[in-house]
Amino acid sequence: MHETTLLLIEVGALLLVLSLLGRLAIRFGVSPIPLYLIAGLAVGHGSFFPLDASQDFFEVGSEIGVILLLAMLGLEYSPTELVRNLRQARVAGLLDALLNALPGALFALVLGWGPVAAVTLAGVTWVSSSGVIAKVLRDLKRLGNRETPVILSVLVIEDLAMAFYLPVLSALVIGEGVLQGATTVVIAVSVVVVILFIALRFGKVLSRLFPANLPEPLLLGVLGLTMLVAGLADEAKVSAAVGAFLVGIAISGQVAHNATIVLAPLRDLFATVFFVFFGIATDPADIVPALLPALILAVLTMGTKTLTGYLAAKRAGIGIPGRWRTGFALTPRGEFSIVIAGLAGAAVEPRLAPLATAYVLITVIAGPLLSRIPDAAWFKTIVRNRRLAAESAESSAEAPAA
């Protein structure tokens, strides 16, 4: 059978299955992300139904999915809001790094994997999945919630921090000299600063380049610019996701609103492809031996990430339910963690990549489920009872003084 014909059959059949899984998830009121991941595992490496002709399609589609998720997340916010959120989240970003990178580094050292593996695993456990979180927030209709800017601020700080971290890790892995490694970092950081400056200073001018009321040219223009900047950012050793997010930030007004409408179907398609490819690229046989240590690490760092979000939302004046929504929303790790583990490779530690894969799968499946807990009736009852108990205790303490 012709390879193109086989590709069409594989992609078409899998999309039909994903449609059924999506309907099933909606029927039971759960996130479809875990089902998409399981579908990917069922047709990936080492599975009973491996997809041979369409793997390249899903790989490229997954990259586009991450770019679109981050670009459209950026479209939700103006440059002014971005700067304000970053300033407010400085402490939260530092706390995030300490609470979530250190456990990964210590875990690698306890396993005896060495300092380079420790730096690698620190990055794996530190960075939340912007792509997964963006989809969860959209699925749960929380983009307009008060805590969403806090979540976004933490994600932006993490993504921007990757501009520093990834070049440093690359230098450690390949053994670059201090001067060459420092040069790589300077170039990456300079690119981020230039993109951010253009987004903040010339965002309105950039928006005028696109016709707000002509859907087809608007779609092609915004999508083209997003992919171009993302590619250039990636070429400069900066995350493509960071470049895409900053393009979204730069576009404002009616153009941003209409771009969100015309890009939404593409985002949904390629975001689904991203989660499926994540499962396709994973061999279930490699995951089994790493499940127990990955589970221990996942439970530990989902707890620290929840604490990070809770404290960040508390500093921002968010109420208790919003604090929990923030903490649980940040728990999934994803695209960056896989990239980091792949960058280190088997040369650093052969067991690191399977551990990272199992770890990410656990957090990506658990994260969307945890995110729904604050909406549950039993959880709301517990929060309300504790608030009433605290108010009662406060009134009792003030009574003698009165």
Image (cartoon, rainbow, N blue to C red):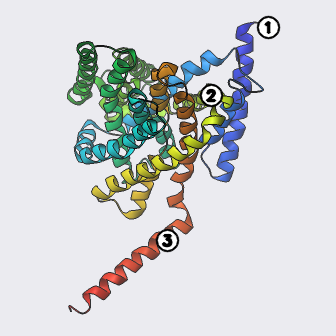
Badge 3 amino acid: Ile
Q: Is residue 23 above or below residue 121?
A: below
Question: Who's the residue at 42% across and 19% down the image?
Answer: 227
Where's residue 401, x and y in %?
Answer: 20, 91
Where's residue 141, x and y in %?
Answer: 49, 49
Q: Quadrant of residue 191?
A: top left
Which residue is under mark 2?
A: 282
62 on left or right of 91 = right
Which residue is under mark 3?
A: 382
Which quarter of the rendered picture does the N terminus lie within? top right
Q: Quadrant of residue 239?
A: top left
Which of labels 1 and 2 is toward the front? 2
Which residue is under mark 1?
A: 1
Badge 1 amino acid: Met
Disc 3 crowd, CA 10 A, few/some/many (<14, 14-19, 20+) = few
Instruction: Please indicate, yes or no, whether residue 248 appears anywhere in the rendered image.
Output: yes
